[in-house]
Amino acid sequence: MDTQFCYVCNDVVKLEVDKYCYKPYGDGGKPTEETKYRHFWHGVPGITRAVGGGGGFNGYAKTLEQARQRAEYYIQSNPYAAPEVKAGEQAVLDEVNRLEALDKESN
Ligand SMILES: [Zn+2]
């Protein structure tokens, strides 16, 4: 299975099953040797500024619990969050739910 280390938490990103983001994009938008990966659920730091902050969330979510709190905040409690922000945070929430379910199975 293809794996990479996440540049936010240093844990393994399983490219075939985990949702992830990567940077920078090489020519044609394809990953290169310099491309770094992170788990999708860490979220997008820029969102916090884009929707006017609030909720005390800055930068990447460091834990699944933080990611869940942030996603639920934007989806349910922030009237300024744009539809695409809410959709993105819903995707984060879906991924958190998936990973937590996996966690329970393995314990
Ligand atoms: Zn990570």
Image (spheres, rainbow, N blue to C red):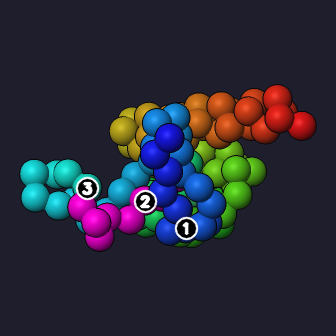
Disc 2 CB within 8 Å of nearest ligand 1 atom: no
The residue carrying pointer 1 sits among few (fewer than 14), some (14 to 19) or many (20 or more) residues within 10 Å by Cα, namely some
- Residue 25 is marked as none
Give the class, few, some or many, for how many residues have Cα within 10 Å of label 2's Cα (few <14, many ≥20). many
Is 33 positioned to the left or the right of 91 in the image? left
Q: Earlier in the sequence, mark 1 or mark 3?
A: 1
Q: CA distance from mark 1 to mark 2?
A: 9 Å
Q: Which residue is mark 3?
A: 31
Disc 1/disc 3 C-alpha distance (Å): 18 Å
Residue depicted at x 28% and y 66%: 33
Name the element at disc 2.
strand
Tell whether position 48 is magenta. Answer: no
In the image, residue 26 lies at what x, y percent? 17, 61
Q: Residue furthest right?
A: 107
Q: Is mark 1 within 8 Å of ligand 1?
A: yes
Q: Which numbered circle lies on residue 37? A: 2
Residue at the image point whose x is 39% and y is 36% from the top: 83
1 or 2: tag closer to the N-terminus: 1
47 left or right, relative to 12? left
Tell me which corner region of the image, top left, top right, bottom left or bottom right, holds residue 9: bottom right
**Mark 3: amino acid:** Pro
Q: Which residue is mark 1?
A: 8
State the image coordinates of residue 88 (x, y, percent, origin top left). Answer: 44, 40
Q: How many marks?
A: 3
Residue 23 horizontal/vertical position (percent): 31, 63
Dots 1 and 3: beta carbons under 8 Å? no
- Magenta part of the chain: 32-40
* Residue toward you, 53 or 61: 61
The answer to whether residue 54 is seen in the rendering is: no
Let me know if residue 39 is in the magenta part.
Answer: yes
